Image: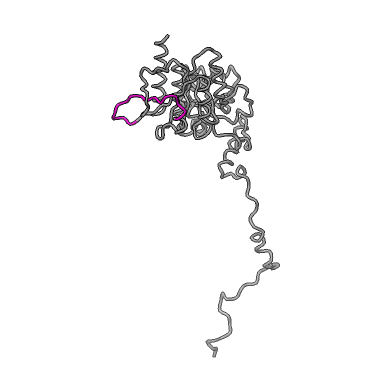
Amino acid sequence: MKSSGSNKPRPGAVRKARKGPQVGSGGQGRQALEGRKPTPKAEDRPYHPAGKRKAAQERFAAAGGRPRSADREQQQPQRRGRPSESASGQGAALGEVVTGRNSVVEALRARIPATALYVATRIEVDERVKEILNLATSRGLPVLEVMRPELDRLAGFDSVHQGVALKVPPYDYAHPMELLDLVQSRGQVPLFVALDGITDPRNLGAIIRSVAAFGGQGVIVPQRRSVGLTAAAWKTSAGAAARTPVAMAANLTQTLKAMKARGVFVLGLDGDGDVDLPGLSLASEPVVIVVGSEGKGLSRLVTETCDAVVSIPISATTESLNAGIAASVTLYEISRLRAAAK
């Protein structure tokens, strides 16, 4: 009779012998001991945004375009806008995309050294589109027909491109004092608008458009804590950015003081100003209008630099005006007073 405590092993309890040479434990954790391999560069990882941009650039290059240099792209400042007339093809690939039929046709009329024109397939051709195509082909500009989803991606999904987009080099900002020299050399009475803390590109675009409409000669933006001339500002300006220079001030307060030394009056806009806009006595003088942000208004240092702080009379039920609208109203009143004084 067999005992219940037999030494016979139970089924499945015996480790089966492996065929072939046995591997020791010395090499099984070698990779873990050595640590992780070097992390690939961002552009070499296909799932990374930089890798996706690199793949898109390679596809664009294969289609006859010019790829952007990843190193140059990382070094390029974020402020982009109106290009320099001497921009090279390599620098042109680093710029903004101007969208909208009015903006594109104005940029081409101003002979912006663009690098490519994108046109949506089956676009509805009107007079502006015909002029855009004629100007582009006469300059030998590459015209690329793309599907609308690709044009949406290129222009930005929140942009209304109207079926056309123009690739332009980075904006070449003027120097504020050189801009003043240019205006005075032409015998014109300076009329500028300076922005203090404006961060919305649509406000900048609207102000550029108003400056062009009411006889101003330029816009001044600070180097820090301010919007630059981006594609959204180009779009809002409706092409006025192609003919209205934008200057960049390293220090807005010091720039305003330097302009005051040259005989330019600095007028700040504020709802609690001590001077009313209607009938402004300084309208016929050289003027720079300083517009603050809608939330914070003018900064303390800029307010102390102003020769006068001007307010726009509005209804008591309205708390304040948008920065772009306030600048437009002021420019119109100064333009009207100057015309009446002639």
**Image mark count:** 0
226 relative to 335, above or below: below
Q: Quadrant of the C terminus?
A: top left
40 relative to 4, above or below: above
* Residue 92 shows in this picture: yes
307 falls in the magenta region: yes
41 falls in the magenta region: no
Q: Nearer the viewer, residue 30 or 204?
A: 204
- Looking at the rendering, which quadrant does residue 113 occupy? top right
Q: Residue furthest right?
A: 21
In the image, what residue occupies the spot 63% across and 37% down?
A: 71
Q: Quadrant of the N terminus?
A: bottom right
Magenta residues span 304-319
Q: Provide the major secondary structure of the magenta segment.
A: loop
Q: Position of residue 14 (x, y in %)?
A: 60, 75
- Looking at the rendering, which quadrant does residue 111 occupy? top right
Q: Position of residue 97 (x, y in %)?
A: 53, 29
In the image, what residue occupies the spot 49% across and 33% down?
A: 226
65 relative to 53, above or below: above
* Residue 238 shows in this picture: no
- Looking at the rendering, which quadrant does residue 51 occupy? top right
Q: Position of residue 133 (x, y in %)?
A: 53, 19
1 relative to 323, above or below: below
Q: Residue furthest left?
A: 317
Q: Residue furthest bottom?
A: 1
Q: Nearer the viewer, residue 76 or 35?
A: 76
Q: According to the image, what is the colour scheme of the structure?
A: one colour
Q: Position of residue 16 (x, y in %)?
A: 62, 72
Would you say 90 lies left or right of 154 here?
right
